[in-house]
Amino acid sequence: MTDKKRVLITGAAGFLGSHLCDKFLNHGYSVIGMDNFLTGSLDNIKHLSSNTDFEFIKHDVTGYIDFSGKLDYILHFASPASPIDYLKMPIQTMKVGSLGTHNLLGLAKAKNARILVASTSEVYGDPNVHPQPEDYWGNVNPIGPRGVYDEAKRFMEAITMAYHNFHGIETRIVRIFNTYGPRMRIKDGRALPNFFCQAIEGQDITVYGDGSQTRSFCFVDDLIEGIYRLLLSDYHYPVNIGNPHEVTIKEAAEEVISITKTSSKIVFQELPTDDPKVRQPDITKAKEILDWSPEVHRSEGFRITFDYFKSVLKA
């Protein structure tokens, strides 16, 4: 039996999950990755296949979960995360946030493991408080097209706190704001993958609404560091992790055009229902509790992301 700390990462073949696998392996952990490939890709973790500290289990977390041996930490990152995914798979999205979270909290209780769950800025809905601090309760339409994702994550937070308060298990909740970087899915429906892919392929760049809605884009390496620090902290309430530098969607599209040197033009389409008008994290708690703030400037992150998408599309 290894003396290394052992961590289970669900959604391990996804964008964030695969980066988390790298992070924990680089820090000397033994990692079990779990995914059912609903939206994840084996390509994201194929570089780990020869790593003796990495084990992969194909499994849907909405089914019963158990395995032998100790378990020190669980990070629950399994879920569709793009609007086009959870609009196509509303039931699966609800189940992974509810049944999946319940199963993993039960596993954490059985193994006496600390669990961190991946919540989202979408718990704030279309906010009427700006920027969004953790004590803002949100403005969510529970029966709208985005409600399956928003409410699944809100339930996730509620049941996680219930397990903490009733069973005394060690829990952590991260509220993730818009994140980008290598291993995002091609054309996954979110703004930056769409912009980069359209620019690289010489297509017009699609902006929904008039482009005045804002987002705050965090580079993946910064986010992963924040999550790692939160897991190892003593704080069990939700913490925003994201980059507070706000930009309009139109400005982001213009930056992509500048970086890619494309001749693409911006075209506008109707804004989707319940699409948030603003999004900006208040990261005061992350700074104070975790001594964390993002370091990668958007211009640098966009260049890295452009190189990634270019390599994948030209492959």
Image (cartoon, rainbow, N blue to C red):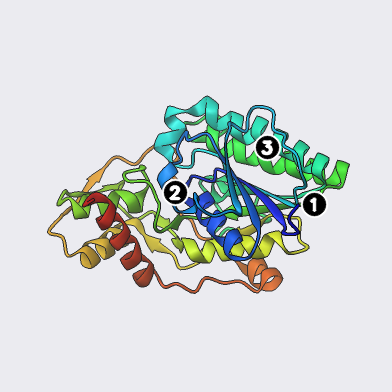
Foreground label between 2 and 1: 2
State the residue in front, 245 or 163: 163
Give the class, few, some or many, for how many residues have Cα within 10 Å of label 1's Cα (few <14, many ≥20): many
Residue 31 appears left or right of 168: left
Residue nearest the observer in this picture, 77 or 145:
77
Residue type, label 1: Glu
Circle 3 is placed at which residue position?
101
In terms of sequence position, does the residue under pointer 2 or pointer 1 come before the other? 2
Closer to the chain start, of discs 3 and 1, is: 3
What mark, if any, has residue 170 been given in the picture?
1
Question: Which residue does the numbered mark 2 point to in the structure image?
Answer: 46
Residue 11, horizontal then vertical, whole percent: 55, 43
Q: Residues within 10 Å of mark 3 (few under 14, many from 20)?
A: many
- Can residue 299 be seen from the camera position used here? yes
Determine which quarter of the picture holds residue 306: bottom left
Choose the circle earlier in sequence order: 3 or 2.
2
Q: Amino acid at mark 3?
A: Thr
Q: Position of residue 255 (x, y in %)?
A: 27, 65
Residue 143, how many percent across, how many down? 54, 28
Q: Mark 2 packing: few (<14 Cα in 10 Å), some, or many (20+)?
A: few
